[in-house]
Image: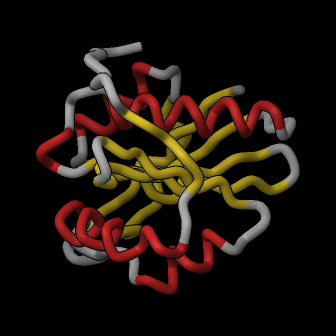
Amino acid sequence: MGERSVIAGLFIRDMRWSDIPEILKIERISFSTPWNEMAFLNEIYNPSSINKVAFYGNEIIGYICANSVIDEGHILNIAVHPDMRRKGIAAVLLEKVIDELRRKGCKSLYLEVRASNISAIQFYENYGFISAGLRKNYYTSPKEDAVVMMLVL
């Protein structure tokens, strides 16, 4: 779906605590209010979480954190290193999570995205996500609304 040029040699596996230093480098250059080490540790050790990393060579170039409660999934965090964006890596990560959530019996998947992040909104729309509402002042630094997006699985 959408543009694809997934790079040869891309490898996806479950996130480990030892990945966190590399993940934090991507997190800090990707977000104005980045997660800290503890936030990632909480997800890694949360039994309802699905956390994946994308490797190219022996470097982590992207990651995704999601979880599920009963029959509902939630994308909590997804990022790809700026040098590796627009190559289909986020799509591969998203597809892995969607497959796992379907296997767990999830019927829907939700996420929040900055209202100004048009490219991310279009990326999710390419997967069939629709706008399900707005969370006022959801983000800080800078303060901004979040578009809540939903996908029927």
Question: x, y percentage for residue 60?
Answer: 33, 54
* Lateral position of residue 153 relative to residue 11, left or right: right
Q: Residue furthest left?
A: 83
Q: Quadrant of the C terminus?
A: top right
Q: Residue furthest front?
A: 58
Colour scheme of this structure image? secondary structure
Total residue callouts: 0
Question: x, y percentage for residue 150?
Answer: 58, 37
Q: Residue at x 37, y 46 (%)?
A: 55
Question: x, y percentage for residue 41?
Answer: 56, 79
Q: Residue at x 61, y 70 (%)?
A: 43
Q: Residue at x 47, y 74 (%)?
A: 18
Q: Residue furthest bottom?
A: 38
Q: Viewer-proximal residue, 116 or 45?
A: 45
Q: Quadrant of the N terminus?
A: top left
Question: x, y percentage for residue 142?
Answer: 20, 72
In the displayed structure, 21 sits above or below 68; it is below
Which quadrant holds residue 23?
bottom left
Q: Viewer-proximal residue, 73 or 94?
A: 94
In the displayed structure, 56 sits above or below 146; it is above
Q: Residue at x 72, y 71 (%)?
A: 46
In the displayed structure, 126 sits above or below 145; it is above
Q: Viewer-proximal residue, 134 or 3?
A: 3
